[in-house]
Amino acid sequence: MSKIKELINKIKKIRLSKMQKLVALIALIALIVAFPYMVNDKYTIHVFILCAMYACLTLSLNLIIGWSGQFSLGHVCFYGMGAYVTTLLMMNFGMNFFLATLISIVFTSTFAMLLCLPTLKLRGDYLAVITLGFGEVFRLFLTNEVDLTKGPAGIPSIPDPVIFGYAIKGKQAYFYFIMILLVAFIAFMKKFNNSGFGMAMMTVNEDDIAATAIGLNTKKYKLLGFGIGGGMAALMGSFYAVYMGMISPTSFAYAESIKMVSMVVLGGMGSIPGSILGAFLLTALPELLRAFSEYRMVLYGALMVVMMIFRPEGMWSRASRLKNEYKIKAEK
Amino acid sequence: MNEILETKGATIRFGGLTAVDGVDLVQKKGEILSLIGPNGAGKTTLFNLLTGVYKCTSGNIFFDHKNITEMKAHERTKLGIARTFQNIRLIRSMTVLENVIIAHPDCNEEKFMDALFRPKKTKEIRRKVVEECEALLEIVGLCDMEDEMATSLPYGKQRLLEIARGLATKPMLLLLDEPGAGMNNFEKEELTTVIRHITDVMKITVLIIEHDMKFVMGISDRIIVLDHGQKIAEGLPEEIQKNSRVIEAYLGSGEFKDEEE
Amino acid sequence: MFFQHLLNGLIIGGIYAMVALGYSMVYGVLQIVNWAHADVLMFGTFIGMLLATFLHVPVIAMVLLAALFTAILGMAVERVAYRPIKSANRRMAVLVSALGMSTFLQNLAQLVFGSGTRQFKVFDTNAYEIGGMKITGMQILILSVTAVMLLILYIMVYRTKLGIAMRACSVSIDNAKLMGINTNMIISGTFGVGAFMAGVAGILVGNYYNAVYPTMGYLLGMKAFAAAILGGIGSIPGAVFGGFIIGVIESLGAGYISSAYRDAFSFLVMILILIIRPAGLLGAKHIDKV
């Protein structure tokens, strides 16, 4: 553990020049493009797609937990809602994947904000219970409304997304697709983190009385935090639906929410690299160590307790925020 | 016609306790008004009523001739009331400069869509925000510490930083809650200069809560004394010093302080 | 039919009340939600089932032993998952840790006991008919045990030194410490008492449905928590009152509206109460918090 910590600190200290950054970026893009050809193994690519997908999901949940300072145990509902809305729009109305996803994002984030509304004035625990309870209602809805959702059996044979007449098909295409999404998510989070909006949200998170004293509407930031995080999760749900080609209520169980929370906690609340690190570790490790997968949930639970006692800021803590990032960004 | 702040019978009750009891207060533009009184007299509670942290049980508050009694705290800030806190409330995870930037309206009203899709415009605004905030830090004498974490500053400097943060909201009225607490005499002199600069150069009206009588007598144009939530005296510093009710209120509670705490 | 639903609701409501007390008491003292509460209950129920099925321990001894085990486990959870947390953002850290503990216990039970449903039936279940309503021996037992447990708790909280100390802690834990109260012990005691009640409730509910399974705490806990919020979290009479109301609403809702959505009613009640009266029904300004 201490060695990992040292390593992370070393990585944090690396500052690249513009040229070096450019080279690193090109190398990274080349690596991503070449990756499916290099490994050429469907299973490995699948694991990487899952890792990237969970990285995106963790980022979206971290926006809610780490940035807006609220606790959601129902993240899997937003993810599931995105998946179901997109799928139903595609299958019932023959809608294009991207249009359907857009609608499902708007729908889900509106829903997320409504869910958050009753607890705005209350402590975080209430929101956690409400989201937990909503998860249960959502599950009941999915299993009981057979006419709409096809019930416990789920919806099979979801069509592939089509873009400019080209269908995204096969592991390789989906790998590129999720990588584009992941890069977009990271870029979005970075912009968000350094924007006035993101800084205001962090202020509300840390001290809501000080926040109102400088003119911030705390309710607005809490609602938007939930809405944006929920919308991002819906996007990933849509991806999941077309990637797997089928969805059922079991994919969106409570344990999935817990898994995402552990990824956020392990990586570091409010940390972008932490989210990615947490998601990759907790997705890849159980796949690598098959024997270990039986104990996975037990370990997630223990991990959450241990991290909170010994390293509540996570592996890659938020304190790594660059000095006066806002100023640096303004002057560059 | 040049009143900036006025309360009429401002009252708040917590259960059986009346923390602020029918206080009438008038402050003119440009005037340095001080609120004094023994501990628990209701000074900070009155501040909280003025800034909207609490809502009046009865009575009205007018700011710049507008009735703001029912207005929310953040709306009052946008209207032009800024404050500092008795127990310092800075954002721990941010630097000195960022703590000021975050209060600047152009920063926290920045359109996120602009940040994503109109980098040029955003960059220009941000540059202006940074410049203005650095100027504010200069006023309170913290500009060479802008890169430090806010909480690593010594106590007195943190209070000055809170003042700079309050100024960044572009207020007409600045409420200072014990700005001199925990400062030594030298720092208090600096503080006096800063407050003078705020009123004389920046033309911002200042309302102060303070315990240090020497400081209060030196800086105030007028003083209001609270005890048990009620206004017991009001007048020029010399008048207050001689007022028998004020002396009684302090001596009665054994808390008269003519030096710092 | 209405009175039958009402009766069934009251009976399951008694169980919710006993579980809700654990949430409410801990919240009163520490202002945290003990997420692992319902999973501690599940563990205790499993122990009871094992004692009865494999060791053939007499019923009374089984209940006492299992509840005692639950109490110890509850105290251990506090020791391991709550007390050591010293993070700057303590509220969030405790919430995460509590959830972690809940996940840990639930999945540990799946590993140890298997994820299937076990049968658990040790009480006689003759059915009686009173005024056209059916009531089973099990239901009568639940009602009487609930009544006895609540009475004991009442005496303990309002008539003993431990109870006075607990109430002192709920007003202000720092002041209680200054008054020379061993607050750590009181916190432990609160967890212990809450878990003991939950252990008894778990054995009753296990027998009522003749089922013990690792995820049994999930829904039960959520409903009990809804009951605690409904009554006003931190309030002992509130938790009891809330428990019965949730039980009745659920039973009537399942009977008259939709049995498929039985588990959704408590959630809807919780949302409504948070919108209308976040302090809960009995959570007035001068509530007797513990």
Image (spheres, coloured by chain):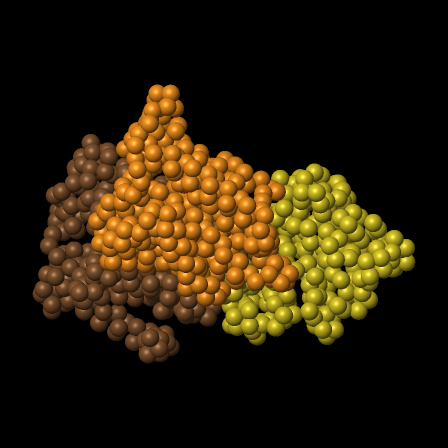
Q: Is residue B243 visible?
A: yes
Q: Residue at x 36, y 58 (%)?
A: C101
In the foreground, A101 or B199: A101
Residue B222 in which image quadrant? bottom right
Residue most toward the front? C58
Q: Residue at x 43, y 48 (%)?
A: C197
Q: Would you say A301 lies left or right of B134 here?
A: left
- Please indicate whether residue C94 sits to the left or right of residue A234 in the image: right
Question: What colour is chain B?
Answer: yellow
Is residue A236 among what the camera can see? no
Q: Position of residue C258 (x, y in %)?
A: 30, 29
Task: Indicate left or right for C92 with A49 as reference.
Answer: right
Observer-nearest of C217 and B172: C217
- Look at the image and give the colour of chain C: orange
Residue B36 coordinates in the image, percent (x, y): 77, 57
Q: Is residue B3 above or below residue A50?
A: above
Position in image of residue C221 (x %, y %): 38, 46
Nearest the viewer among B134 and C267 is C267
* Image quarter of the C terminus of chain A: bottom left
Name which residue lies at 38% across and 66% down.
Answer: A307
User: In the displayed structure, would residue A167 be above or below residue A95?
Assistant: below
Which residue in the rendered view is the most extreme toward the top? C132
Looking at the rendered image, the quarter that the N terminus of chain A falls into is bottom left
Query: Is residue A120 depicted above or below C258 in this figure?
Result: below
x then y, percent, for residue B203: 69, 57
According to the colouring, which chain is brown?
A: A
